[in-house]
């Protein structure tokens, strides 16, 4: 059994949402990406009303990728100079056996995981069409994916900015909420 630390990425290791930042980056270069992204607004509203799920809403949003001429080049350019945004608290304690588990698209986070030398579990999204390949890596799905991809690991410590990651926190020996680079013990149920 391998004992590892697992980290959420957006607003945890990185102080902002990487997908939102990547979309803003693309919008500045290719304003026509706005059309498909705006088409996702009914899905976002439907999600709030319980008419659709987060995976479908994100998939509708990711259709903006069809208007990016070279997604791989855009991702590379996006991350150039952003590695300095990685939280110093994380860099001080990172280990090569860490696992990042994120709802952001795998094609977007792969360069970061490679640079940090860690393993990655992220939402599987086709970078050319925006179609999702499986469920959004969020909530209970993070636990399912971890157990499916790394069946021989046990989570020592888990870090996230969001209580929606409580299923992951429950399987960890210790869990921490990250707020602006500060670590706090995970709140107990009912607090």
Image (cartoon, rainbow, N blue to C red):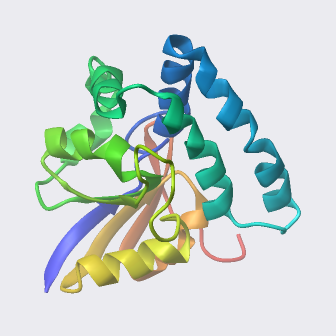
- Which residue is rendered at x = 31% and y = 26% of the image? 79
One can see residue 55 in this view: yes
Residue 8 position in % (x across, y down): 41, 55
Residue 133 position in % (x across, y down): 44, 65
Foreground residue among 74 and 147? 74
| For residue 44, above or below residue 181 | below
Q: Quadrant of residue 189?
A: bottom right
| For residue 3, above or below residue 109 | below
Foreground residue among 31 and 79? 31
Residue at the extreme right of the image, as rendered: 49
- Which residue is rendered at x = 48% and y = 65% of the image? 137
| For residue 30, above or below residue 141 | above
Residue 185 position in % (x across, y down): 48, 61
| For residue 57, above or below residue 18 | below
One can see residue 180 in this view: no
Residue 186 position in % (x across, y down): 52, 64
């Amino acid at each position: 059994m391998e004992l590892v630390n697992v980290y959420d990425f957006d607003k945890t290791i990185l102080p902002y949402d990487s997908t939102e930042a990547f979309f803003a980056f693309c919008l500045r270069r290719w304003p026509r990406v706005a059309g498909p992204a705006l088409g996702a607004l009914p899905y976002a509203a439907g999600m709030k009303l319980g008419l659709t799920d987060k995976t479908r809403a994100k998939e509708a949003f990711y259709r903006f990728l069809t208007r990016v001429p070279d997604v791989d080049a855009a991702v590379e350019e996006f991350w150039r100079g952003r590695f300095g945004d990685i939280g110093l608290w994380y860099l001080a304690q990172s280990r090569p056996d860490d696992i990042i588990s994120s709802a952001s698209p795998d094609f977007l986070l792969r360069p970061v995981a490679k640079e940090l030398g860690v393993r990655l579990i992220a939402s599987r999204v086709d970078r050319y069409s925006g179609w999702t390949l499986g469920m959004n890596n969020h909530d209970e799905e993070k636990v399912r994916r971890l157990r499916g991809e790394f069946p021989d690991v046990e989570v020592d410590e888990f870090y996230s900015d969001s209580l929606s990651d409580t299923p992951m926190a429950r399987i960890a020996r210790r869990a921490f909420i990250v707020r602006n680079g500060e670590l706090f013990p995970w709140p107990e149920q009912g607090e």
